[in-house]
Image: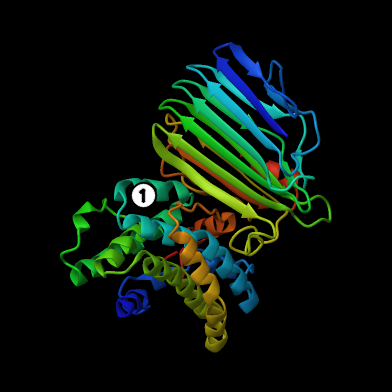
């Protein structure tokens, strides 16, 4: 089961997560994020909002009502660009997961499900516990943000990796919080704004 | 201090208008005003406001002045909860002055708005993190609105020293003022997103509403963004 966690959380898992910067590309363009220090502050803010929410919903989706959870996620995602990004990533993950675990109950998913809900189903299919489902979710948010920062700012990859390792206890703590059953709802106004600004660009590196 | 206030609005009248300090209410032709009749909220305070807008009624709530949350002599956070139900054809406008989080305050706001199908809403929230030249206190501003039994907008803004990352570029980026304006009306075809200013955006929700969310250096600038 530990190997299953590593495989599902691996950036090479073909789920398309790394096509998205979740507003970071616009934050860099606006000058709001220029260096590793700012990246750390973005990471912590995103982990405590989107990261905790993704993990809590992935855990809840393992045995919850996916339609209700999908509606709750819609209501927690004020930005239409981020709703679209989440549904696109959900579709990409579902495409891969259907091939890998053909017998899992994918038919229970709503049309175009949000990514955390598909992640919960995939984690259940992979036999992951709640704890490890949550860990895979927060890890996904952390590495997607860090790798986007690496590409956008041309940072030293060792320094970015050192930052992620330094944040590991925070990831553990958030995963532990996510399994408590509370459907997190953390808002990040400037992430919404950056994602909407980004959606107006004609030329961009990331899908969101 | 524990206090409770209740407003029930029917078309053209207010059959229930009951408050107690520090949640004193005063009805004017323009709106029902929440008049702060004590300092605070202070740590340990537990304040509840219940609003019921019955069929085809319009209720507008304002406040006479900004609320300043401060630490108290008693342990524990100060709490303010608002619950509102809005009937079909009814309208609620929640337009209070800003909430200021004083240094070392620990304030929790929870608002739950239940809109029936055909109800409309205007809901403004403004938050100022600290008085002039003062670090912010802790705050959790939690909001949930449902429309016709479905979740419409659910979010919580955590600010202050207890919330790492809150002043980072993903959340408020050091802005002292932040806020939102939610409009709900199922009879309007809400437009696509609009960038109102470099730190203010209007966005169509998945349900029948439009949300402006903004940060600003001060309360005055914020208000200008939230009137769009």
Tell me the quarter of the picture where residue A160 sits.
Answer: bottom right
> What colour-coding does the image apply?
rainbow
Instruction: Return the x and y of residue A76 as percentages of the image width and height.
Output: 46, 49
Q: Residue at x 66, y 52 (%)?
A: B215
* Displayed quadrant of residue B208: top left
Whole-percent x and y of residue B164? 63, 64
Which residue sits at x=79%, y=28%?
A: B37
Residue farthest along the left direction in this orientation = A103
Check the image and name the residue furthest to the right. Answer: B133
Is residue B227 among what the camera can see?
no
Q: Nearer the viewer, residue B161 or A97?
A: B161
Q: Position of residue B177 (x, y in %)?
A: 71, 50
Residue occupied by mark 1: A69
**Residue B82 drawn at (x, y percent):** 59, 33
- Quadrant for the C terminus of chain B, please: top right
In the depicted structure, whether residue A131 falls above or below residue B130: below
User: Would you say A75 lies left or right of B68 here?
Assistant: left
Q: Residue furthest front?
A: B74
**Which residue is located at x 65 percent, y 55 percent?**
B159
Q: Nearer the viewer, residue A124 or B94?
A: A124
Q: Is residue B104 visible?
A: yes
| Chain at tag 1 | A
Front residue of this view, candidates B20 and B218: B20
> Regarding mark 1 in the picture, which secondary structure is present there?
helix
Q: Nearer the viewer, residue A117 or B196?
A: A117
Tell me the quarter of the image containing the N terminus of chain B.
top right
Image side of residue B215 versus residue B136, left or right: left
Question: In this rendering, would A5 be left or right of B40?
Answer: left
Tell me the crowding category of disc 1: few under 14, some 14 to 19, or many 20 or more residues within 10 angstroms, Cα based.
Answer: many
């Amino acid at each position: 089961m530990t190997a299953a966690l590593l495989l599902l959380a691996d950036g090479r898992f073909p789920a398309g997560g790394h096509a998205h910067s979740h507003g970071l590309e616009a934050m860099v363009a606006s000058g709001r994020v220029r260096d590793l220090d700012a990246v750390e502050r973005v990471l912590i803010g995103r982990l405590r909002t989107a990261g905790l929410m993704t993990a809590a919903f992935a855990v809840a989706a393992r045995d919850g009502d996916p339609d209700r959870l999908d509606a709750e996620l819609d209501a927690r995602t004020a930005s239409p660009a981020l709703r679209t990004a989440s549904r696109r990533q959900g579709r990409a993950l579902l495409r891969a997961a259907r091939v890998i675990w053909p017998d899992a109950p994918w038919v229970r998913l709503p049309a175009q499900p949000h990514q955390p809900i598909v992640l919960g189903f995939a984690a259940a299919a992979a036999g992951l516990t709640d704890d490890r489902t949550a860990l895979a979710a927060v890890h996904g948010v952390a590495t997607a943000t860090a790798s986007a920062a690496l590409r956008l700012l041309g940072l030293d990859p060792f320094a970015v990796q050192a930052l992620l390792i330094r944040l590991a206890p925070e990831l553990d703590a958030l995963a532990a919080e996510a399994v408590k059953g509370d459907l997190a709802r953390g808002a990040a106004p400037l992430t919404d704004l950056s994602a909407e600004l980004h959606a107006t660009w004609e030329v961009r590196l990331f899908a969101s | 201090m524990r206090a409770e206030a209740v407003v029930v609005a029917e078309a053209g009248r207010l059959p229930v208008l009951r408050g107690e300090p520090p949640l004193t209410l005063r009805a004017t032709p323009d709106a029902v005003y929440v008049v702060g009749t004590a300092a605070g909220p202070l740590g340990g305070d537990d304040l509840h406001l219940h609003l019921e807008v019955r069929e085809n009624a319009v209720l507008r709530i304002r406040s006479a002045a900004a609320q300043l949350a401060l630490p108290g002599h008693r342990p524990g956070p100060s709490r303010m909860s608002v619950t509102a139900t809005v009937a079909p054809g009814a309208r609620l406008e929640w337009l209070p002055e800003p909430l200021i989080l004083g240094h070392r305050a620990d304030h929790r706001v929870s608002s739950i708005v239940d809109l029936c199908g055909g109800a409309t809403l205007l809901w403004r929230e403004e938050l100022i993190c600290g008085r002039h030249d003062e670090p912010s206190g802790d705050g959790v501003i939690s909001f949930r609105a449902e429309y016709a039994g479905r979740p419409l907008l659910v979010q919580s803004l955590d600010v202050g020293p207890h919330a790492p990352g809150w002043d980072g570029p993903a959340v408020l980026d050091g802005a002292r003022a932040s806020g939102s304006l939610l409009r709900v009306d199922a009879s309007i075809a809400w437009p696509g997103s609009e960038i109102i200013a470099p730190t203010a955006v209007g966005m169509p929700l998945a349900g029948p509403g439009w949300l402006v969310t903004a940060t600003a250096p001060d309360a005055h600038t914020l208000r200008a963004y939230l009137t769009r």
